[in-house]
Image (cartoon, rainbow, N blue to C red):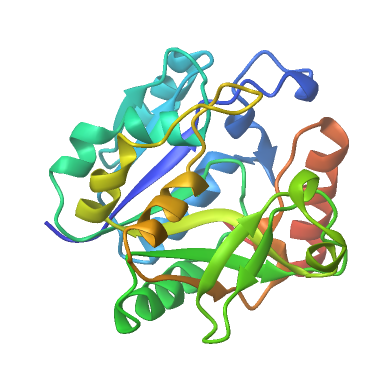
Amino acid sequence: MGNCAIILAGGEGKRMKSDKPKTLSPVLGKPMLMWVISALKNAVIDDICVVKGFKKECIEEFLNTLDFGIESVYQAERLGTGHAVMMAKSFLEKHSGNVVILNGDAPFMTSETIGKSLAQHIESGCAATVISAKVDDPTGYGRIVRDTNGNLKAIVEQKDADEETLKINEVNSGGFWFDCQLLLSVLGRIKSDNKAKEYYLPDALKLLLSDGKKVGAFTAECSDTVLGANDPQQLQELNRIATEKGYTC
């Protein structure tokens, strides 16, 4: 089968002060999750799997309102982004093409960015491609560190970055393209040997690099690609940006 997508939508979003999953919080009246699904559909990626978690019945109810089918899997324990993708292992095993993994609370990931990043991913022969963006204030984001050829060398989180790395303004959007089979080859090797005891998806990139595979980064044209919301103020800001810039779902 061809290209497919996994949307991570298991988050509770405690700071949202809402009784529903974070990804169902509205931007211009439509759930953030719907924005991501629409971008994928407009990029002609119809085979989609949503990883649900907190109040999974709310996600199921929403998906049932759509006039097209979307698969979903349940992440009973929220143990990180890598763990979430592990829950979709059987979905991945059905595919021999590429998979894009997106956050369900990043509504401004556009179909154009999805399509162009896929084109670069294929043309460059990469095992994985990170979707990045250049921002005015990179504070809090994972920095994209490239080698002399422009390929990805590492994603360095804010807390782990030295002074030079902190100056980098190219950041990780949380969106990734992977060759499905190569992702499966490293997925089970991701470890939770960190303070949070969680499985992180960017560790898959480290494993692919250690296996001698090529990993790239695609820079989105618009920095809004990286924006998400963790609290009502940030959600309000997303609504303001969407209104001012004329974004539509």
Q: Position of residue 127 (x, y in %)?
A: 32, 65
State the residue at coordinates (17%, 61%).
Answer: 2
Q: 68 or 98: nearer the eye? A: 98
Q: Is residue 135 above or below residue 96?
A: below
State the residue at coordinates (43%, 13%).
Answer: 57
Say which quarter of the image contains residue 87.
top left
Taking the image as shown, residue 104 lies to the left or right of residue 221, namely left
Taking the image as shown, residue 82 lies to the left or right of residue 11, namely left
Locate the C terminus by quadrant: bottom right
State the residue at coordinates (19%, 33%).
Answer: 90
Locate the N terminus by quadrant: bottom left
State the residue at coordinates (78%, 70%).
Answer: 168
Q: 16 or 169: nearer the eye? A: 169
Say which quarter of the image contains residue 170.
bottom right
Q: Is residue 185 above or below residue 222?
A: above
Q: Is residue 235 visible?
A: yes
Say which quarter of the image contains residue 105.
top right
Q: Position of residue 20 (x, y in %)?
A: 62, 18
Q: Position of residue 12 (x, y in %)?
A: 62, 20
